[in-house]
Image (cartoon, grey):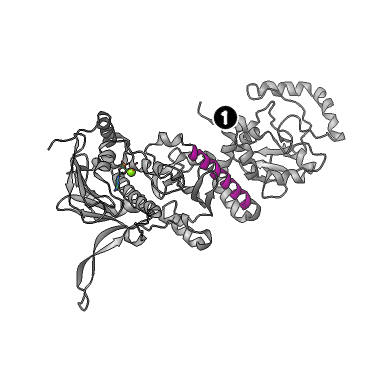
C-alpha cells in the first residue's frame, strides 16, 4: 500500500516540532491528553444540539496505559472520534486544527473549554515515539480507521478494529540513547507525576492502572500485589471553586502543594474575573523573602494555565518587576494553548490580565496597610525594598502605583509611617517633607544636621536603605509637598535671632576658615560658618541635588 506524503510544509514543520518547539519531551503527554479532553468536550457540545445523543459525564474518561515489555504507551479517550476524512485532514496536515474548525463551525464563543487551535500538539508524540498509531471511530459511525506514521516520511490510513466510539493512540516509545532517556515514559510513577503536573485539572478523569502492595488478609506480615484503576487528576481546581467553600488552610495547602514557598503565605488573593477578560487566579503574598530574592537568580512569574492545562511555569509577563515576589497561578479560557513564549508576549488577553492582576495586588496591599498594619509591616520588611526599587525604576513611571505603599521610620512616631500620615500631621508653617539619611536610625539621630529641624518640632523621615533617597527623588513631591534633605543648603526654616550672628562670625574668622580649608583641600570644597549647628561644633553638608549619602552610594557602585 502506498504511503501518503505529508505536504512539504508539513514535513518541515514536523521536523521543527520534534526538534525545537518544545524544550521538554514530557510535554507530549499534556498535548495528547488535551486532545482527548477536547474530543470529549466536542461530544458534549454535539449532544447539546443533537437529540439522538445523550451525554452522561460519568461515561467519559481518558486512560493512560504503559506496557513496559512491549514499550508502548497508550492514550485512550471516549470522545467524538474521527472519520476517515477527519483523520486525513487533522493528522495528515500539520498545523491544521480540527478543533479550531469545530469551534468556528459551531460558533462557540470565547469562554468554552476546547483547548486546541494550533494543530501542532499531536505531533509532539514523535518526540518520544518511533511509531504512532491512532485507531479511531467517529460518533455515529460503524467503521473504525487506523492512522499510522513513523514521523516525517508519511502516514498510512487503513480500516481498523475498534468497538466503542473514541480514539486510541499507541506510542511505540523510543529506545534510550546515550544522550536521551525514554524509559521514564513507561514508568507508572513518572507518568503520574507528568499528569499531575500538567493535566491535574482536566475536567474528565484521567485513569491509570496502578500497581501496589497491600497486607494479605489473614497473613502475618505477608503482602500481596494488586492492581487497580485510579483517577490520577483531581479534576476540579481550587481556583474554580467558590471562595466561600474554601478555608485559609485550603489556600495554604495549595501554596505548599505547588511549592511556591516553604513559609506560609501572608495573604492570598483569589480572583474570578468575568469582565473584558475571563480568568481565575490565586495569588499569594509570601511571608519571607526567598533566599535568592534580591539576586539575578530569582525568577519572577506566575503559572499560566489555559483551561486547566499548564502552559508555562513562570510567566514573567503577568507580573511587574516590583510585584515580582507574588506567587501563584492564572487560568484563562481566553488564552489559547500557546506553544511559544514569543506568541504569548503579544497576546492582548495576557496583557489585560496582567494589568488587572497588578491592580488587584496593589489594592490588596493597600487594604492590608490600612486594616492589618501588623501584617503589612513584616511584609514591608521582606519586600519594601522591592517597592522602592519599583518607584525608582523606569524613570519613576510606576510611582503613582507605589508611593502610598511605602513606609519610612519617623523621628517623631519612632515607628514606620506612610507619606500620607506624615503630610497629614504637618503644621501649617512647615514647607517641606524633611528626611535624614544614614546607615542606621542610631547614626541618624547623632547627625548634627537634624537639630535645626527637630528643634523646630518638625517630623523627619529617616532613610536607612540605599535606595530610599533615590526613590524619593523620583517621587519629587507628595501631595504638593517637596522632599528636603536635612543636610541640604536651604531648609526653608527661618533662622532664630541668635543665628544671625553667623554672618559676622564668617568675616571675623576668615583667616581661620581659610587655613582649615587649605588643610582639608581635596576633601572639602569650602569651610564656612553654619547657621544650623546647635550642640555640635561642626557638620558636613552637600551643595546641589546630590546629598552626601547619595554621593557615597554612587561612588560605591561599580562603573
Ligand atoms: P490542536 O489540538 O491545536 O487542534 P493537534 O495537533 O493537537 O492540534 O490536533 C490536531 C487535530 O486532530 C485536532 O484539532 C483534532 O481535530 C484532531 N484530534 C487529535 N487528537 C484527537 C482525539 N483524541 N480525538 C479526536 N480528534 C483528535
Ligand atoms: Mg491539541
Q: For the residue labelled by badge 1, is the local secondary structure a helix, a strand or a loop?
A: helix
Which of these two is toward me, 408 or 193?
193
| Residue at the image position 51 percent from the left and 59 percent from the top | 242
Q: Name the side, left or right, on which 505 lies relative to 324.
A: right
Which residues are drawn in magenta? 348-368
495 to 262, vertically: above or below = above
Quarter, ligand 2: top left
**Magenta span dominant secondary structure:** helix
Can I make out residue 466 in this image? Answer: no
Q: Position of residue 301 (x, y in %)?
A: 46, 43
Q: Name the side, left or right, on which 361 lies relative to 111.
A: right
234 to 121, vertically: above or below = below
**Mark count:** 1
Q: Position of residue 115 (x, y in %)?
A: 38, 45
Can I make out residue 514 in this image? Answer: yes
Q: Position of residue 336 (x, y in %)?
A: 41, 42
Q: Position of residue 187 (x, y in %)?
A: 23, 53
What residue did someone put label 1 on? 554
Which of these two is toward me, 269 or 274?
274
> Which residue ends up furthest to the left in the rendered image?
1
158 falls in the magenta region: no
| Residue at the image position 33 percent from the left and 50 percent from the top | 39
- Local crowd at mark 1 within 10 Å, few (<14), some, or many (≥20)? few
Quadrant of the frame with the N terminus: top left
Amino acid at each position: 500500500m502506498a504511503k501518503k506524503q505529508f505536504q512539504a510544509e508539513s514535513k518541515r514543520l514536523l521536523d521543527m516540532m520534534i526538534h525545537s518547539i518544545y524544550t521538554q519531551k514530557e510535554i507530549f503527554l499534556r498535548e495528547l491528553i488535551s486532545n482527548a479532553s477536547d474530543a470529549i468536550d466536542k461530544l458534549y457540545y454535539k449532544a447539546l444540539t443533537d437529540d439522538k445523543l445523550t451525554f452522561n459525564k460519568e461515561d467519559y474518561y481518558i486512560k493512560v496505559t504503559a506496557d513496559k515489555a512491549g514499550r508502548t504507551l497508550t492514550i485512550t479517550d471516549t470522545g467524538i472520534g474521527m472519520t476517515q476524512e477527519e483523520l486525513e485532514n487533522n493528522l495528515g496536515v500539520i498545523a491544521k486544527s480540527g478543533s479550531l474548525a469545530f469551534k468556528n463551525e459551531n460558533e462557540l464563543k470565547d469562554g468554552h473549554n476546547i483547548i486546541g487551535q494550533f494543530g501542532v500538539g499531536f505531533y509532539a508524540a514523535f518526540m518520544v515515539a518511533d511509531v504512532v498509531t491512532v485507531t479511531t471511530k467517529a460518533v455515529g459511525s460503524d467503521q473504525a480507521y487506523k492512522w499510522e506514521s513513523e514521523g516525517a516520511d508519511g502516514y498510512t490510513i487503513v480500516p481498523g478494529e475498534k468497538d466503542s466510539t473514541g480514539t486510541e493512540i499507541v506510542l511505540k516509545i523510543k529506545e534510550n540513547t546515550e544522550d536521551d532517556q525514554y524509559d521514564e515514559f513507561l514508568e507508572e510513577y513518572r507518568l503520574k507525576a507528568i499528569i499531575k503536573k500538567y493535566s491535574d485539572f482536566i475536567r474528565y478523569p484521567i485513569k491509570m492502572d496502578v500497581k501496589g502492595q497491600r497486607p494479605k488478609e489473614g497473613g502475618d506480615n505477608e503482602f500481596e500485589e494488586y492492581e487497580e484503576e485510579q483517577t490520577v487528576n483531581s479534576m476540579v481546581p481550587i481556583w474554580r471553586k467558590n471562595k466561600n467553600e474554601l478555608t485559609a488552610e485550603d489556600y495554604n495547602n495549595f501554596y505548599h502543594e505547588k511549592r511556591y514557598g516553604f513559609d506560609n503565605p501572608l495573604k492570598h488573593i483569589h480572583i474570578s474575573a468575568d469582565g473584558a477578560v475571563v480568568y481565575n487566579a490565586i495569588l499569594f503574598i509570601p511571608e519571607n523573602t526567598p533566599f535568592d530574592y534580591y539576586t539575578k537568580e530569582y525568577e519572577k512569574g506566575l503559572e499560566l494555565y489555559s483551561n486547566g492545562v499548564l502552559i508555562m511555569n513562570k510567566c514573567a509577563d503577568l507580573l511587574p518587576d516590583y510585584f515580582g515576589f507574588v506567587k501563584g497561578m492564572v487560568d484563562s479560557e481566553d488564552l489559547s494553548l500557546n506553544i511559544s513564549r514569543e506568541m504569548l508576549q503579544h497576546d492582548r488577553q495576557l496583557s489585560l490580565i496582567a494589568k488587572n492582576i497588578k491592580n488587584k495586588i496593589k489594592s490588596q496591599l493597600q487594604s492590608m496597610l490600612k486594616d492589618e498594619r501588623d501584617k503589612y509591616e513584616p511584609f514591608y520588611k521582606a519586600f519594601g525594598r522591592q517597592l522602592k526599587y519599583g518607584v525608582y525604576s523606569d524613570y519613576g513611571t510606576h510611582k503613582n502605583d507605589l508611593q502610598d505603599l511605602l513606609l519610612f521610620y519617623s523621628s517623631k512616631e519612632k515607628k514606620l509611617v506612610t507619606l500620607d500620615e506624615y503630610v497629614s500631621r504637618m503644621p501649617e508653617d512647615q514647607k517641606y517633607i524633611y528626611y535624614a539619611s544614614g546607615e542606621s536610625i542610631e547614626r541618624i539621630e547623632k547627625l548634627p544636621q537634624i537639630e535645626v529641624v527637630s528643634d523646630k518640632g518638625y517630623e523627619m523621615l529617616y532613610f536607612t536603605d540605599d535606595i530610599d533617597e533615590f526613590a524619593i527623588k523620583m517621587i519629587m513631591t507628595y501631595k504638593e509637598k517637596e522632599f528636603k534633605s536635612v543636610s541640604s543648603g536651604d531648609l526653608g526654616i527661618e533662622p532664630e535671632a541668635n543665628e544671625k550672628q553667623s554672618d559676622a562670625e564668617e568675616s571675623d574668622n576668615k583667616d581661620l576658615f581659610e587655613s582649615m580649608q587649605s588643610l582639608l583641600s581635596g576633601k572639602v570644597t569650602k569651610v564656612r560658618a553654619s547657621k544650623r549647628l546647635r550642640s555640635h561644633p561642626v557638620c558636613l553638608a552637600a551643595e546641589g541635588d546630590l546629598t552626601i549619602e547619595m554621593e557615597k552610594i554612587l561612588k560605591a557602585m561599580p562603573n
